[in-house]
Every structure is written in C-alpha cells, then in structure tokens.
C-alpha cells in the first residue's frame, strides 16, 4: 500500500511539472516558447551568445526568440537591436573586470518599454515580465524606457 502511494505521488508530481511547463502566464495569458529557455541556457552555460532579444508574438500569443547576438558582438550592437517604438525583453551577458583584476560575468534581464510604444503593448509586456523573468531565473534587471536608461554605465553600476 505504501509503495503504491509513493508511485501515485511520483506520477502526480511529474504530471504537475509537465503542466507547469505548458502553462501560460496567468496574468496576461502569454505562454513562453521552450526555445526561449533553451537559448538562455546556451547563453548561461555554454556562452554561445552575448545577448538574446525576445518578443511577444501576436499570432501565437507566446514569448519567442527574436534575435541572438554572437559572443563577439558589442553592447552597441545589442542596444541597436532594440526597436525604437516597440517593447522587448532581452538578456545581456555583461563581462567585466573587478578591482582585484578578476574576470566576472553577470547576466542582466532587460525590460525595454519605450515611452512611444503603444499603451496596450506596454501593458502586455509589463504583465508578462515577472513570470518570464522567474522562468529564466535571472537576478539582475534593468527597466528602460529610453536609450539613456540602458547605457553601459547602468550595467556597470548594478554589476558591482
């Protein structure tokens, strides 16, 4: 009897974890495409990318990967990839050297929401952000509404 209960509990736990992966964002109804997480893990563990830009696809109602930045791309290339009039999420792998001359890296979650973007779009991105950030498990965050808020100096300040 005890063994049967343990088996049932394991099956239930497995089933619940599968449902959690397929579940959409409860607040906004926006799901996260599995490729988003896989590319993030490639950036985090294998360092295959310098940055990833994500967007909410209107047709599929999912957060999807829009662009992958090569490991040698600059911060200017990253900021230039963000649209002037539309919202995006992004991940940026920031490398720096500490005062003790140690090479370090911090991964930043960027919530890009320009003042000139549509109100509906800003609300959709704002309501989906926390869940998406939690799924990626990113500690450092930058919220930006114009280019001055995503200058490299802001990342430096938060990294130290």
Image (cartoon, helix red, strand yellow):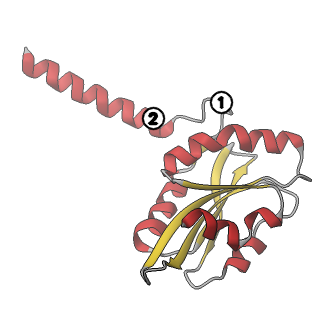
Q: Which quadrant would the C terminus be assigned to in this image?
A: bottom right
Question: Residue 63: which disc?
Answer: none
For label 1, the residue is 27
Report the label total. 2
Q: Note whether 129 is above or below 96 in the view shown.
A: above
Q: Where residue 23 sits: x, y (%)?
A: 52, 34
Q: Where residue 86 sits: x, y (%)?
A: 83, 56
Q: Identify the residue at horizontal 50%, vertical 51% (top origin).
A: 136
Q: Note whether 5 is above or below 44 in the view shown.
A: above
Outermost residue on the front side: it is 99
In the image shown, does 34 or 28 lie closer to the viewer? 28
What is the quadrant of residue 140 in the picture?
Answer: bottom right
Outermost residue on the top side: it is 1
For label 2, the residue is 20
In the image shown, does 22 or 130 lie closer to the viewer? 130
Q: Identify the residue at horizontal 48%, vertical 72% (top origin).
A: 105
Outermost residue on the right side: it is 116
Tag 2: Cα neighbours inside 10 Å, few (<14), some, or many (≥20)? few
Nearer the N terminus, badge 1 or badge 2? 2
Numbered disc 1: secondary structure? loop
Numbered disc 2: secondary structure? helix
Q: Identify the residue at horizontal 63%, vertical 54% (top origin).
A: 64
- Name the mark nearer the viewer: 1 or 2: 1
Q: Marks 1/2: CA distance?
A: 15 Å
Tag 1: Cα neighbours inside 10 Å, few (<14), some, or many (≥20)? few
Q: Identify the residue at horizontal 74%, vertical 65% (top origin).
A: 150
Q: Where residue 62 sits: x, y (%)?
A: 65, 46
What is the quadrant of residue 83 in the picture?
Answer: bottom right
- Answer with left or right where residue 85 lies relative to residue 61: right
């Amino acid at each position: 009897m005890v063994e049967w209960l343990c088996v049932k509990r394991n099956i239930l736990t497995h089933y619940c974890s599968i449902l959690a992966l397929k579940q959409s964002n409860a607040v906004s109804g926006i799901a996260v495409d599995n490729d988003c997480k896989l590319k993030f893990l490639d950036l985090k563990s294998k360092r295959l990318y310098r940055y990833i830009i994500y967007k909410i696809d209107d047709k599929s109602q999912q957060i999807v990967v829009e662009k992958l930045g090569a490991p040698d791309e600059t911060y200017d290339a990253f900021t230039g990839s963000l649209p002037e009039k539309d919202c995006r999420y992004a991940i940026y792998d920031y490398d720096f050297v500490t005062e003790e001359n140690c090479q370090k890296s911090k991964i930043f979650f960027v919530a890009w929401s320009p003042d000139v973007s549509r109100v509906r779009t800003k609300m959709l991105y704002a309501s989906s952000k926390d869940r998406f950030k939690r799924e990626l498990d990113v500690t450092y965050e930058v919220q930006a509404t114009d280019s001055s808020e995503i200058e490299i100096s802001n990342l430096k300040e938060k990294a130290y």
